[in-house]
């Protein structure tokens, strides 16, 4: 279990660290700095857009994981189709008595190759994860809906760091994103910290 937790956290940690270093180094050259003012506690310009590093630390590992799920699921689908094709060919072979021996040996070699490929896919995934691949793929749409809204908010914060947006615009976009996610999906609801379904959706 500990290796699973470490495997989930370590990629994000590495990406966040690298992206944070890049933002700190290159942010001032891009105008992504918070300058001192009467409402600020720092006396020198400070790099901003740390949210970009956090966003990358979340989205990039999840995108790699999603691609891996697609690859594993695609390979399993190909193997199952080929296994089905081999089975139908074997039944055709059984009906032809004159060539049973030679074709059965070909079918057997193909089945062995498919079996080795399927076992390779199974070995590449931990035993506690492999059974959950279809469920993970089914649920991933909910995750990416939420991350799409988070991406819009990250870009909004980046624009605010760069140009200083009006608070009314920021609040309006944030509210619109929340309403859109709740409206477009049956899996999310807005709470507003009150128990009023007619208001929160």
Image: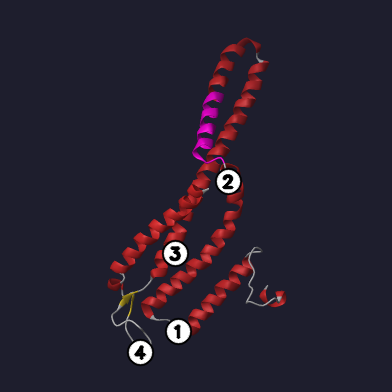
CB atoms of marks 3 and 4 within 8 Å? no
Write down the region rendered in magenta.
Answer: 111-127
- The residues tagged by marks 2 and 1 sit, at their Cα atoms, a distance apart of 44 Å
CB atoms of marks 1 and 4 within 8 Å? no
Along the line of sight, which residue is nearer the eye, 50 or 107?
Answer: 50
Q: Name the residue carrying label 1.
A: 166
- The residues tagged by marks 3 and 1 sit, at their Cα atoms, a distance apart of 23 Å
Secondary structure at numbered mark 1: loop
The numbered mark, 2 or 1, whose residue comes first in the sequence reads 2
Place of residue 52 in the rendered image (x, y in percent of width and height, measured from the top left): 40, 67
Q: Quadrant of residue 74?
A: top right
Along the line of sight, which residue is nearer the eye, 101 or 116?
Answer: 116
Q: Name the residue carrying label 3.
A: 55
Along the line of sight, which residue is nearer the eye, 123 or 106?
Answer: 123
Q: Name the residue carrying label 4.
A: 38
Residue at x 43%, y 65% (from the top left corner): 54
For the residues carrying marks 3 and 4, which lies nearer the camera in this image?
Answer: 4
The numbered mark, 3 or 4, whose residue comes first in the sequence reads 4
Place of residue 114 in the rendered image (x, y in percent of width and height, measured from the top left): 54, 29
- Residue 166 sits inside the magenta stretch: no
The answer to whether 152 appears left or right of 15 in the picture is right
For the residues carrying marks 1 and 4, which lies nearer the camera in this image?
Answer: 4
Image disc number at residue 133:
2
The numbered mark, 3 or 1, whose residue comes first in the sequence reads 3
* Mark 4 surroundings within 10 Å by alpha-carbon count, few (fewer than 14), some (14 through 19), many (20 or more): few
* Mark 1 surroundings within 10 Å by alpha-carbon count, few (fewer than 14), some (14 through 19), many (20 or more): few
CB atoms of marks 4 and 2 within 8 Å? no
The numbered mark, 1 or 4, whose residue comes first in the sequence reads 4
Secondary structure at numbered mark 3: helix
């Amino acid at each position: 279990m500990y290796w699973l937790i470490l495997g989930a956290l370590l990629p994000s940690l590495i990406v966040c660290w690298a992206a944070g270093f890049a933002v700190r180094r290159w942010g001032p050259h891009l105008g992504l700095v918070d300058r001192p003012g009467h409402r600020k506690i720092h006396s020198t310009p400070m790099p901003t857009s740390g949210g970009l590093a956090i966003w990358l630390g979340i989205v990039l590992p999840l995108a790699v994981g999603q691609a891996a799920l697609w690859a594993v699921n695609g390979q399993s689908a190909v193997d199952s189709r080929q296994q089905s094709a081999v089975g139908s060919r074997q039944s055709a072979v059984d009906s032809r008595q004159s060539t049973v021996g030679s074709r059965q040996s070909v079918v057997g070699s193909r089945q062995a190759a498919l079996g080795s490929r399927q076992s390779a896919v199974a070995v590449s995934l931990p035993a506690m994860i492999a059974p959950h691949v279809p469920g993970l793929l089914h649920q991933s749409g909910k995750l990416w809906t939420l991350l799409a809204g988070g991406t819009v908010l990250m870009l909004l914060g980046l624009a605010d760091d760069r140009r200083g947006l009006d608070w009314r615009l920021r609040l309006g976009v944030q509210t619109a994103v929340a309403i859109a996610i709740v409206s477009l999906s049956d899996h999310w609801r807005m709470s507003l910290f009150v128990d009023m379904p007619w208001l929160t959706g």
